Image (cartoon, coloured by chain):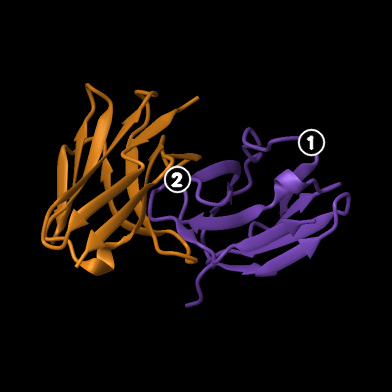
Amino acid sequence: GENVEQHPSTLSVQEGDSAVIKCTYSDSASNYFPWYKQELGKRPQLIIDIRSNVGEKKDQRIAVTLNKTAKHFSLHITETQPEDSAVYFCAASYNFNKFYFGSGTKLNVKP
Amino acid sequence: GAGVSQSPSNKVTEKGKDVELRCDPISGHTALYWYRQSLGQGLEFLIYFQGNSAPDKSGLPSDRFSAERTGGSVSTLTIQRTQQEDSAVYLCASSPGLAGGEQFFGPGTRLTVL
């Protein structure tokens, strides 16, 4: 089955700096890669996703890159703000069947 | 329209008792997922329903866990003879299905087994 690894487990940045979170996956058949943000005590919410036919996708301060050959994908947050502080999860799926999640990255943006 | 709802929001039970957790997906969503999230951990896949197909139960940790989905809508996750290690937040999500689309999560049920 699929195995998704996520790094780092914690990340602390100064407000205004960029943050990068990386994930690798094992199953080359996976073709959908969402990223979720989970604030303390709340449900995960989708922030951006990418399909395997695309190498990069951007939405304002957030971008995701995908390298299918190397089987890794990354989340980039620019101009970080304190409200970006949360736990971020990557996931991988084949055709929207079951999703395999990474272990999460706790991002702390210091004002 | 309403999002995914789950009940109860909190459940405290004694070791050895059975519990039932309920999930109401978004209307029209054919895919429904159950996950378990232990404190400070990631989401562990439990089971996946897609339309009328047989569910993918490959994530269920033991035969004490079962789930059903009636009429392609509401789902119930049942844990029999609960153990302390079953304590976690159980999250349900739904999505439009094979055509793709975002997974929407419910608020979760926090299960505590004493």
Name the foreground residue: B87 vs A94. B87
Residue ID for mark 1: B63
Q: Quadrant of residue A61?
A: bottom left
**Chain containing mark 1:** B
Determine whether B52 is above or below A108 in the image: above
Image coordinates of residue B65 in percent, x first then y, are: 76, 43
Label the purple chain with its letter. Answer: B
Can residue B70 be seen here? The reply is no
Residue ID for mark 2: B98
- Residue kind at label 1, given as amino acid type: Asp
Q: Is residue A77 left or right of residue B91?
A: left
Image coordinates of residue A36 in percent, x first then y, are: 36, 54
Tell me the SS state at disc 1: loop
Q: Quadrant of residue A90?
A: top left
Name the foreground residue: B17 vs A32. B17
Task: Give me the residue at 51% from left, 76% from top.
Answer: B2
